[in-house]
Image: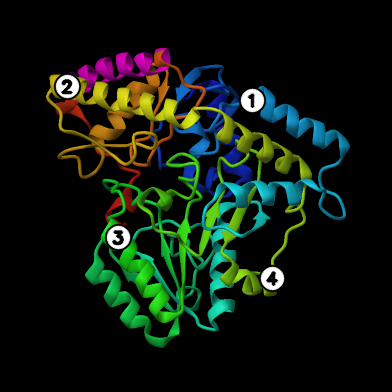
Amino acid sequence: MSGPIDKALRRRAEAVIPGGMYGHQSVGLLPDDYPQFFTGGEGAHLTDADGRRYLDLMCAYGPNLFGYAHPGIDAAYVRQLEKGDALTGPTALMVELAEAMVAMVGHADWAMFCKNGTDATTMAMMTARAHTGKQGLVLARGAYHGAAPWCTPRPSGVIASDKAHQHLCAYNDIASLEAAVAAAGDDLAAIFAAPFRHDAFIDQAAPDLAYARRARELADARGALLVVDDVRAGLRVARDCSWSAIGVAPDLSTWGKCIANGHPISALLGADKARKAAASIYVTGSFWFAGAAMAAGLETLRLVRDTDYLERIQALGETLRTGLAERASAAGFGFRQTGPAVMPLFLFDDDPDLRKGFAWSSAMLARGVYVHPWHNMFLCAAMTEADIATALDAAEAAFADLKRNAASLGPVEKLAFLAAR
């Protein structure tokens, strides 16, 4: 819970940081008792500025795949840091990492590296437009593809031309997809798809096979590129691109978050058909070729290949899902768990303004388990059966708290943005 050190840091931040905080940790997006500042993490646990330790089901919003401060991954990072990180040009690790990712991802013949997910999705957009000579983009309404002007979910600072040539559809709705493609006409450059519907505030949904196949067919028919944005789900749903699980291959896929277990790197992967276009665009950054994160990425991918991390987190996720369902039912709550078990979202029935969700999340936090009231969460390979048992014990007590206090819950006043979503 937010303690005196955290509160003091917030006051200082208000003076020198617009809004006191920005992005997904913006003030007001989480309950007031949630800490804003942290001192470190180890394995599956996070420590806040006041020294309180939590089992972290947010995993830094996704980058933590094998555990905070993973000794092997961090050692690889430090070894390369001591040799050289941001140099005048890349090290050989850039080639090695590209080879490793191409070998891992079925649809990929080449790779380009950057730093953030937004970098990767923007590069995908530019590659598609260079490949086709067209401008139109089909996007699922409510899907998140980054924070650049063309894709940011907030209107402030964005002008109409930033989002021109975009055509929105409903995820998993074939008729809606076809209508959006028809609206693009002869100007379609790309169809963007999330690996599953992971919009904030609403139930998650797996990709419907017929929808995914139709997206592939429509892209081919129009000479457009199909892009799967795997920045959030990559390596948590499959060791390949997430849509490999349903047998639909994109032309481009975007990666980030956990491909170096939290060290800053992201990637655009593509098929040979888009290679010439990718080579023609001009994209760069002062730190994009830095070697240390690439070394961490190579060690992360080795663990992806050589361990049963995916099977273990899937099993832990199912145990958590089953246990939460039992405890919510026993307490008399309609409690929806959607999305893959390794990336769950929790929402309460009859909770349009998230009062129940905020109260329950705060009760979990008070018992040392960091959950999120409206964003999907993540399991990591450092979690254990004992951690899941701890989370379930906390949940049982949190449901009991909520049942006792449900009648007195106040409004979540700071969430005015909910009405506009």
Q: Are marks 2 and 1 in contact (CB under 8 Å)?
A: no
Q: Is mark 2 on a helix, strand or loop?
A: helix
Label whose residue precedes the other's in the sequence (2 or 4):
4
Determine crowd level at label 1: few under 14, some 14-19, many 20+ residues with C-alpha closer than 10 A: some
Work out which residue is located at the far bottom of the displayed protein and give it: 186
Q: Do the residues labelled 4 and 1 touch (CB within 8 Å)?
A: no
Residue linked to disc 3: 171
Q: Do the residues labelled 2 and 4 touch (CB within 8 Å)?
A: no
Residue linked to disc 2: 403
Determine crowd level at label 3: few under 14, some 14-19, many 20+ residues with C-alpha closer than 10 A: many
Q: Residue at x 39, y 48 (%)?
A: 245
Image quadrant in which the N terminus is located:
top left
Residue linked to disc 4: 279
Q: Which colour scheme is used?
A: rainbow
User: Quick check: can you spot residue 199?
Assistant: no
Magenta span dominant secondary structure: helix
Determine crowd level at label 2: few under 14, some 14-19, many 20+ residues with C-alpha closer than 10 A: some
Q: Are marks 3 and 1 in contact (CB under 8 Å)?
A: no
Task: Point out residue 192 in the picture as x, y percentages from the top left corner.
Answer: 43, 65
Q: What element carries label 1?
A: loop
* Range of magenta residues: 386-405
Q: Which amino acid, by three-letter code, is at mark 2? A: Lys
Q: Which amino acid, by three-letter code, is at mark 1? A: Ala
User: Quick check: can you spot residue 213?
Assistant: yes
Residue linked to disc 1: 69
Work out which residue is located at the far left of the displayed protein and give it: 332
